[in-house]
Image (spheres, grey):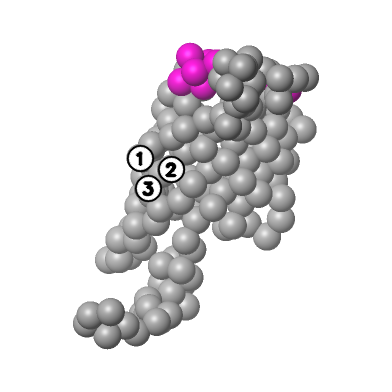
Amino acid sequence: MPPARCSPNAYDRAINAGKAIMTKDEATSFVEQFARARSRGRGEHLWRQDGKLHYPYADRVIEGREIGALCDITAAQAPHLTWEMIGWTHRDDVIVVEWLTTNRYGDALIRMTGVDRLTVKDGLIIEEIVYADTAPLRAMIEGAPLKAIMTLPESL
């Protein structure tokens, strides 16, 4: 909470001195570009070459310069994948996007939700951390039913 004698904007500027802070309009513009690109399965033009993608579906951190190749691999391995933005917010140079994906695997339709935490520098992604529930996909790959971890009584 900002001190009473300091306006919220002045307080934010003071604690973020030296940080690149996006305006609401800049963040909105970036998110619109990001959502359009992701809904088409692309987005490499939004990345710094030295950026880092932390992605739960891969076995290593992906470099910004590799994002185009990742998009190509994903399109080849998951041609029915859809991506939809549910909502977003931002603070300073961080944008958080909530999303829903669907993909068809044979007769099964898998729906997954998640969140991307994007750090943007000079209008490009320098780091993205993807948080997603991979359980439905893992259960399908393993051929096992998706089961709850806890069984609860009808009424708590």
* Position above or below: 135 against 69: below
- Mark positioned earlier in the residue sequence (1 or 3): 1
- Mark positioned earlier in the residue sequence (2 or 1): 1
What amino acid does circle 3 point to? Leu
Q: How far apart in space, not on screen, are marks 1 and 3 (Cα)?
A: 7 Å
Q: Circle 1 sits on which residue? A: 86
What amino acid does circle 1 point to? Ile
Q: Circle 2 sits on which residue? A: 98
Q: Secondary structure at mark 3?
A: strand
* Position above or below: 13 against 81: above
Q: Which residues are magenta?
A: 19-28
**Label 2–label 1 contact, CB within 8 A:** yes
Q: Which numbered mark, 3 or 2, is in the foreground of this view? A: 2
Q: Residue at x 22, y 82 (%)?
A: 154
**Label 1–label 3 contact, CB within 8 A:** yes
Seen from the viewer's position, the closer of residues 44 and 128 is 128
Q: How far apart in space, not on screen, are marks 2 and 1 (Cα)?
A: 5 Å
Q: Circle 3 sits on which residue? A: 100
